[in-house]
Structures are given as C-alpha cells and as structure tokens.
Amino acid sequence: MSVSGLVNAAGRPAPGSTRPGRGKRLLDVTAAITLLVLAAPVLAVVAVLVAVGLGRPVLFRQCRAGRHGLPFELVKFRTMRPVDGRRGLVTDAERLTPLGRWLRATSLDELPTLWNVLRGDMSLVGPRPLLPEYLTRYSPTQARRHEVRPGVTGLAQVRGRNSLDWAEKLELDVAYVDNRSLRLDLAILGATVRTVLRREGISATGSATAPEFLGSPR
C-alpha cells in the first residue's frame, strides 16, 4: 500500500497499523550498521571531495531538538562555506557551493546522520530534526512532532519535502506521529528512494534551502 493509503484523511491509523515499539529500534540499528558498512567507500570519497572543495572540518555539526525536545548534535557532511561578510558569504544561497548543491540533491550529505541513528538520537523515519529555537514557536499540536525520535526521512519528505510550506510539513509530522507503524516506515523508506532519485523538493521556492520557521498564526 502507498504512503497516502496508510495515512488516511481523518488522521487516524490506517487499518492494520500497529505502533512500531522495539521493532522500530531494531530496524534502525540493523539498517544503520548495514548502510554504514556498505556506504564506507562512498563516505570516504565524499569526505575527500568536501575536504578539497570546502576545506576542514569535513563534517557539519549542529544542535537540534530531538525526542521530547531534548538537544543532540546532528552530524552531516558540510555543504556550505563559513559565513564571511567581507567575502559576501552571508545567506545560504551565497554560501552553498556547487558541490554542496549536488550533495544535497543526492542526499549524500545525510550519510553521516546514520551515526545519529545508531546512537539513538534519531530514527530512520520520523519528523526531521529542527533547530531548538523553534521549540517555542510551535502550536501545541505542532509540538507533538517531538513525541517520537526525529528521522533521517519522514512523511513530509516524501510528500513534497521543501516544496511544502511550514504548516504543511508540520501537519504531516503530526500525522506521522498519530499513524506511526513499521508498515508506514517501510512505505516511507521506499518512497524516499524514489524522491531522492527524482531529486524532488530539494529547496523551497525562492530559497537555496528552506526559510526559517517563524511560527504559525495562533
């Protein structure tokens, strides 16, 4: 069944859905270890490309809000130059390099995030981890996205990614929380492969990445 079929319009679990529980964590750990081993040559090549093209550090580290809003350090490959007002490198569009655009388009910049999955900071599937500054900007309903571990991919990522506005993305995040199941996770993982191959929704309209979330009207 498709992702849309598993999440019905009423926002209730689709027939046959069950809470993932320990099976989800087992899937996360098994898949993260397997993918890290298989992708080791790719990780090495991308690390060299980033070191040559952007310099060191190769990895981008940033505090993000995890389950229950608790902070953790997200790890990804760098795709941008450092902020440098003297060189006109201030906005994301100015700092993002051609290599960085390619890494984002192919989602190769996300490979180190599997380490966050292995550590238990994240899951393979869940709402994307966002900045801690956003925690006070969510409505009570939107804040429910933090009832689960954030994910490398999620429902919003396969239903439009950054082409969606913030209200749409956060609504899908909460829909995932209400409908989460191993069956839904597997459907989202399959849809993620198609989304990456098609390079859909990489950036928001008029933005190199995605605009800042400033809060939703109350």
Image: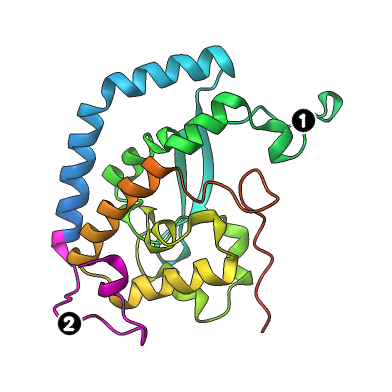
Magenta stretch containing residue 13, yes or no?
Answer: yes
Mark 1 residue element: loop
* Left or right for 196, reference 91: left
In the picture, the quarter occupied by the C terminus is: bottom right
Asked whether the residues under the numbered discs 2 and 1 touch, taking CB atoms below 8 Å apart as contact, a structural biologist would say no
Residue 77 position in % (x across, y down): 47, 30
Residue found at the far right of this picture: 86
Mark 2 residue element: loop
* Left or right for 118, reference 91: left
**Kind of residue indicated by mark 2:** Pro
Residue 135 position in % (x across, y down): 57, 66
Measure how far apart labels 2 and 1 are at the Cα level. 51 Å
Residue found at the far front of this picture: 198
**x 21%, y 58%: residue:** 186
Q: Which mark is residue 152?
A: none
First in residue order: circle 2 vs circle 1:
2
Residue 127 position in % (x across, y down): 41, 61
Q: Which mark is residue 15?
A: 2
Label 1: how many Cα within 10 Å (few below 14, some 14–19, many 20+): some
Label 2: how many Cα within 10 Å (few below 14, some 14–19, many 20+): few
Q: Main secondary structure of the magenta part?
A: loop
**Kind of residue indicated by mark 1:** Leu
**x 37%, y 83%: residue:** 9
Q: Which residue is mark 1?
A: 89
Which region of the structure is painted magenta? Answer: 1-23
Magenta stretch containing residue 192, yes or no?
Answer: no
Is 70 situated above or below 85? below
